[in-house]
Image (cartoon, rainbow, N blue to C red):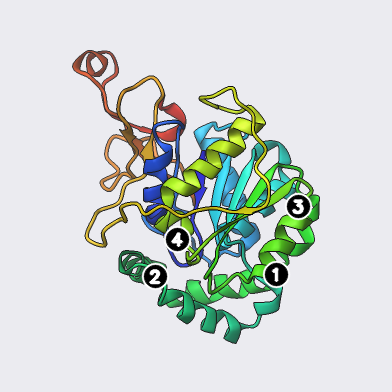
Amino acid sequence: MVLVHGYGVSGAYMLPLARSLAPSFSVFAPDLPGYGRSQQPRNALGIADLAAALAGWLDATGLQRPAFVANSMGCQIVTELALHLPGRVGPMVLVGPTVDPERRAARHQLLGGLRDAAREPRSLLGLAIRDDAVVGIGALLATARSALADRIERRLPLIEQPAIVVRGEIDGFVGARWAERAAALLPRGRLVVVPCEPHAVHFTRPDLVARIVHELLVEEGQQAGSQLRRRLPHRHVAAVKTDQLGAGQDPLPLRGDPGREKSVVIAPDEQGSGLDRRELGAQVAVRREQNPAEEAERPGADCVADNCW
């Protein structure tokens, strides 16, 4: 399971959803080039560039056709990848897919951002401010131009993967008509609306979104803990409150290993020591928990993602 972040934020805000998914799935939340702890690219990257970087990251990790959960601009990136490399992308959950064609103008996006910011939790706003400072204003503006020019509505009818569009009912960026249209454009698409939730519904209701993901994968027969197959129709779902990520926490993506009793932490390496680091824009290093016997057999607990587990 790969979680793809949106515009101006790193994979850190995917942590609540990663925690909810970790008991059932192997979960990765990479930082795209220029975001979070990934390397800064020489030039600002557009949607196609970010999709290519994500493809390179999949090659490095050795993941074969994983499922994706993407939010906002991440939906543009994942659908771009699915269109050009359909064999590399599994089922998709698209949370608040942008850009709503009726709100494509920059002024509409700005107003939508202000509206939505008032509805998002403070902890998420704190993460966004921190991540924006890392990216820089020049890169943010260049990526925004690419995102606004991108016509996701033209490629949705060409996406062959099963997909669920998830919209928070009070999403300031994605209107109800666009969410319905996006789900209808997808040949195997469906819509789920979460009442009284904003744009980052995966952050505010991670357990609910995790349940949606699980139902989709059960239906598709992939990594399901249950053999029961159920159809997930267009519908509104009840939102149950869950704990939110505090702004003061140092977020780390989580990976759930069904063979273990607890989750295994996957942390971007901060020192870079002992790693065979690869020159990939979307590079993520991981740290593996080992017992003393494993340490004796395999010196060095650090490794890149495609050498782990």
Report crowding for label 4: few under 14, some 14 to 19, many 20 or more residues within 10 A (C-alpha). Answer: many
Residue marked by disc 1: 177
Disc 3 to disc 4: CB gap under 8 Å: no
Of residue 159 and residue 77, the one placed in the foreground of this image is 159
Q: Earlier in the sequence, mark 1 or mark 2?
A: 2
Residue 280 visible to the viewer: no
Residue at the location (75% across, 52% down)?
A: 186
Q: CA distance from mark 2 to mark 4?
A: 10 Å
Residue marked by disc 2: 132
Of residue 260 and residue 140, the one placed in the foreground of this image is 260
Residue marked by disc 4: 34
Q: Is residue 170 left or right of residue 191?
A: left
Q: Is residue 8 left or right of residue 262?
A: right
Residue 219 visible to the viewer: yes
**Amino acid beneath label 3:** Leu
Disc 1 to disc 4: CB gap under 8 Å: no
SS for callout 2: helix
Coordinates of residue 84 in the picture (x, y in percent): 73, 48
**Amino acid beneath label 1:** Arg
Relative to 239, is 150 above or below?
below
SS for callout 4: loop
Q: CA distance from mark 3 to mark 1?
A: 14 Å
Q: Earlier in the sequence, mark 1 or mark 4?
A: 4
Of residue 169 and residue 57, the one placed in the foreground of this image is 169
Q: CA distance from mark 1 to mark 4?
A: 33 Å
Residue at the location (38% across, 19% down)?
A: 259
